Image (cartoon, rainbow, N blue to C red):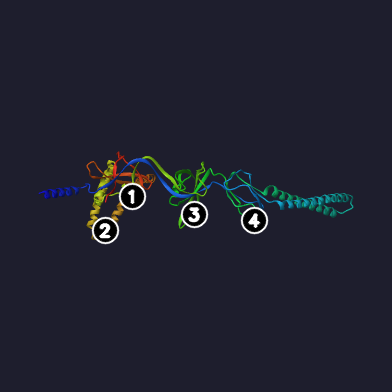
Amino acid sequence: MKKLIISGLLTLLCMSCTGKNNITATYDFTSIQRGTLERTVSSSGTINPVATVRVLPRMSGRVEEVRVDYNDIVKKGDILALLNTDMLRLKRDQQNASVQKARANYELQLINYRSQEILAQRGFISEYELRTARTTLDNQRADLAVAEANLRVIETEINQYAFITSPIDGIVLDRNINAGDTVVDSSNSNSSSIFTIAENLREMQIEAMVGELDVTSIHRGQNVRFSLESLPGRRFSGVVDNLRMVPSVSNNVVSYTVIISVENRDGSLLPGMTCAVDFIVERAENVLLVSNAALRYQPTSLSSTQISDMVFNASLENMTDEQRDEAIEARALQAAQSQQQRQNNSGINNLMIGNQNQSRMMGTGRQQGNRSAPDQRRSVPAVVMRTLWFINAEGRLDVIQVRTGISDGSLTMVFLNDDFEERQVILRERI
């Protein structure tokens, strides 16, 4: 008798579990809560100074002295290095002699020309001889000018070019010379930079590569958040300064360079650091959020027809009376067409005709919608409706349709008419 009672109880329990929408599985639940959500585009980049200047020597020579080192702060005009000027001083003495010689020849020829001019006025020499004397005087004047110009070049090299100075205010990032090295002037193809100076390390920039699929979401003035592996736990911010239109193709992937302006007031950002960048595309505060897994869930204890019917009934709650009547009529028509299609499934021709009729009806519906308000359809963004499953007050499985917004990949913003805040929805079924 005891066994029969236990058997009856088990049978009753199994029968009650077969009822429609009864709970026949164990679930994991999650809450719909309020919070802040951001939609971002992720990338990586390298931190660099906003402007760097490469210093090249303006004359060739041997380095006599180097006065700065890495990370030294310099001002515009500060001497960075000195070049040996021994040979230049000898050339200056030699050129001084050339200038004196040219000046003496010029002065002598000037006296000769004045004498020839007096003789020509009295008719003792011809016009040709006077012009010859004038030409010789002009040549001597030109020789003197050339000699003086060469002297000024040598003096400029001694007094200016031998002193390698900083062209800007900044910090020395790189030094490529030592005392005793020989440098080549910048006009030579073998010349190379001897110093690299950053204009200002308090203001830096990030060069980030963004793919062509995401670059349309990037615009000037957009807020950016980035982090560094070398400084875990710290978050930095910046602003998009420029988007370079020149594409970069690597392994058939098209990318564009985005310049991000960042501040480096504490000096923690160093040139060359690699950072992970998040471009903030959209941000929503104090909105309802739900896990994406809950939006993807569908119960396995129900058939596809049952799920479709429950979702359809849930969608009616968000409609007006007119929309509800149209939706019920359209669903009834669809059911009738499906029933007719199943009855004619044995004949291929009938099936093809049924598909063509259905396509024409769907096309007609779209055309009518386009005729009513074509411009309005273009301006209104697409509304995405998703489902959330939960256990209602009667202990039965139930569903609600919600309109979704932005998503960060794990959470999605939802819009609910009812007060679903803190409501428990089904996340997954337990195995």
| Inter-mark Cα distance, 2 to 3 | 51 Å
* Residue 126 numbered mark, or none: none
Q: Amino acid at mark 1?
A: Arg
**SS category of the residue bearing label 4:** loop
Relative height, residue 378 to residue 352 (above, below)? above
Q: Nearer the viewer, mark 4 or mark 3?
A: 4
**Residue identified by numbered label 2:** 351
Do callouts 2 and 4 mark residues in contact (Cβ within 8 Å)? no
Could you tell which of marks 2 and 4 lies nearer the N-terminus?
4
**SS category of the residue bearing label 1:** helix
Mark 3: few, some, or many residues within 10 Å (few <14, many ≥20)? some
Could you tell which of marks 4 and 3 lies nearer the N-terminus?
4
At a point 43% along the width and 48% down the height, the residue shown is 41
**The image quarter in which residue 168 lies:** top right
**SS category of the residue bearing label 3:** strand
**Residue identified by numbered label 3:** 248
